[in-house]
Image: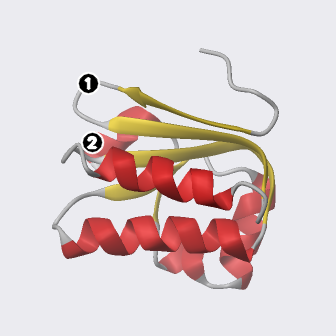
């Protein structure tokens, strides 16, 4: 599967949905990210957002992830951030959100967590 430099794509795995993000997640397309995350949660299976190809994320991107986390928690679902890049991890740690989100190394680990 190929993802554009700034892209969002969802794929179904075995028992989960994985939303792959790439590029710079900023205000210019964070609403697209939000929609992809919420649509994935509507499937009723665990959702992972893969961030290994994200080089930058701003507060609007973080807000989209927080909304997904809150929606999953409200509905008793599982939501995790997968293969978090160093750039995203730095922002999560700064905001102390690394203690809030479930962080897993791979999509397969989402089911085991």
The residue drawn where x is 41% and y is 65% is 68
Q: Which residue is mark 1?
A: 14
Say which of 57 and 89 sits in front.
57
* SS class, disc 1: loop
**Residue shown at 55% from the left, 67% from the top:** 64
* Vertical arrangement, residue 106 with respect to residue 62, above or below: above
User: Which x, y percent locates residue 109?
Assistant: 37, 40
Indicate the secondary structure of the residue bearing disc 2: helix
The N terminus: image quadrant: top right
- 21 on left or right of 68: right
Q: Earlier in the sequence, mark 2 or mark 1?
A: 1
Q: Are marks 2 and 1 in contact (CB under 8 Å)?
A: yes
Can residue 104 be seen in this snapshot?
A: no
Which percent across, then down, holds residue 58? 77, 70
Q: Which mark is residue 72?
A: none
Residue at image position (31%, 70%) is 71
Q: Indicate left or right for 13 with 45 as reference.
A: right
């Amino acid at each position: 599967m190929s993802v554009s430099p700034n892209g969002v794509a969802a794929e179904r795995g075995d028992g989960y949905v994985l939303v792959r993000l790439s590029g710079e997640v900023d205000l210019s397309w964070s609403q697209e990210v939000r929609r992809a995350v919420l649509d994935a949660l509507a499937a009723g299976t665990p959702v992972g957002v893969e961030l290994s190809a994200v080089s930058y994320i701003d507060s609007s991107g973080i807000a989209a992830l927080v909304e997904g986390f809150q929606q999953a928690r409200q509905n008793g679902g599982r939501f995790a951030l997968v293969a978090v890049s160093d750039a995203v991890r730095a922002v999560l740690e700064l905001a102390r959100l690394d203690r809030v989100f479930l962080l897993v190394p791979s999509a397969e680990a989402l089911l085991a967590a």
